[in-house]
Image (cartoon, rainbow, N blue to C red):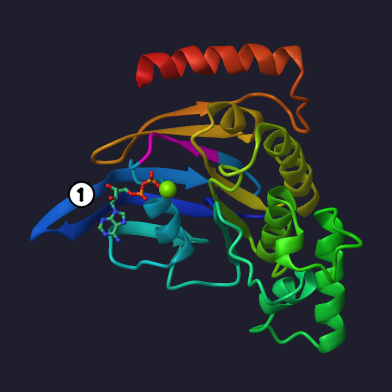
Amino acid sequence: MAGFLMAFSLLSIKKLNKSFRHEQKALTVLDGINLDIEQGEFISIVGSSGCGKSTLLRLIAGLDQDYQGEILLNQAPIQGTDLKRGLIFQEHRLLPWLSVSENIHLALEETHLSRTEKSQRVQEHIDIVGLQGFENAYPHELSGGMAQRVAIARGLVNKPDILLLDEPFGALDAMTRSHLQAELQRIWQHEKITMILVTHDIEEAVYLGDRVVVMSARPGKIKQVIRIPIEHPRSRSSEQLFHIRNQTLSQLDQLI
Ligand code: ADP
Ligand code: MG
């Protein structure tokens, strides 16, 4: 039987405008954002501080519903937050009085899984982020990188369709950051989910992204979308990545 399928994007942002009221005036933060994201894509968003990246992620997460235009997920407007969209921030936001596994458990509170299923799910995600043996550790006993791994596990434990990451490695040292970037690539491939990563680290954006969305500031617009035509998994030391990275950097130099 011949199948008949209408192709549509997982996430479709159309003519998105967002403004905040500031001292009686409207401050336009996002202006005419159009972006289609496919199921399973890795999208990096770069742009200088204040250009509206976090605002855009919050809108996609459903944390803020005051905007003009459309944000469609599977063709339906986004309405409020949903376990199908996970969000990870620069700070881990773990509760200090709960252990690693309790912090991850907390994200499953609103699900209908049985107690055993929850425990299995938590353990599975502790394994995915490589924290076996630290189940009972408390946040203050973890390094910054480990705490961010817990945050990633917590973001993934509900098996979201989309994981939104707002500068997740911004506060980490260079070694840890580069290690966690490789880990994120592995996790993304393993989970086969869509990831949208906001970063101001251009190398990180190019290393991980299928496409790099470049934003300009005041008001935030999409300046360009650059496709990174390299298969995953990517090796940071590959010649091909080196070339594309240099190309992209010089392209960005002319853009910004
Ligand atoms: P980025 O994440 O790219 O650094 P943000 O999305 O945080 O930028 O902010 C974009 C702009 O919107 C900034 O000028 C910021 O001051 C303003 N802004 C963000 N949130 C609010 C808010 N709740 N009220 C007023 N202005 C805001
Ligand atoms: Mg931000």
**Crowding near the residue tagged with mark 1, few <14, some 14–19, many ≥20 C-alpha atoms within 10 Å:** some
Q: Is residue 48 found inside the magenta-colored segment of the image?
A: yes
The N terminus - image quarter = bottom right
Q: Is residue 71 among what the camera can see?
A: yes
Q: Is residue 87 left or right of residue 116?
A: left
Left or right of 148 on screen, residue 15: left
Q: Which residues are magenta?
A: 44-49
Asked if residue 39 shows in the view, the reply is no
Q: Secondary structure at mark 1?
A: strand
Residue 222 vertical placement versus 253 (above, below): below
Percent x, y of residue 167: 53, 45
Per the image, is 27 magenta? no
Which residue lies most toward the right here?
A: 133
Give residue 178's position: percent from left, percent from top.
Answer: 71, 34
In this orientation, which residue lies closer to the viewer: 113 or 145? Answer: 145
Mark 1 CB near ligand 1 (8 Å cut): no
- Residue 22 in the image, given as x and y percentages of width and height: 15, 57
Asked if residue 57 is positioned above or below residue 41 in the image, the reply reads: below
Does 88 sit above or below residue 157?
above
Q: Residue at x 73, y 42 (%)?
A: 180
The kind of residue tagged 1 is: Thr
Looking at the image, the residue that sits furthest to the left is 24
Above or below, 238 relative to 188: above
Q: Position of residue 83 (x, y in %)?
A: 60, 72
Residue at 80% across / 49% down in the picture?
A: 190
Q: Residue furthest front?
A: 140
Residue at the disc numbered 1: 28
Rendered residue at 72%/44% (across/down): 184
Q: Quarter holding the C terminus?
A: top left
Residue at the spot x=34%, y=68% of the render? 65
Left or right for 113, reference 223: right
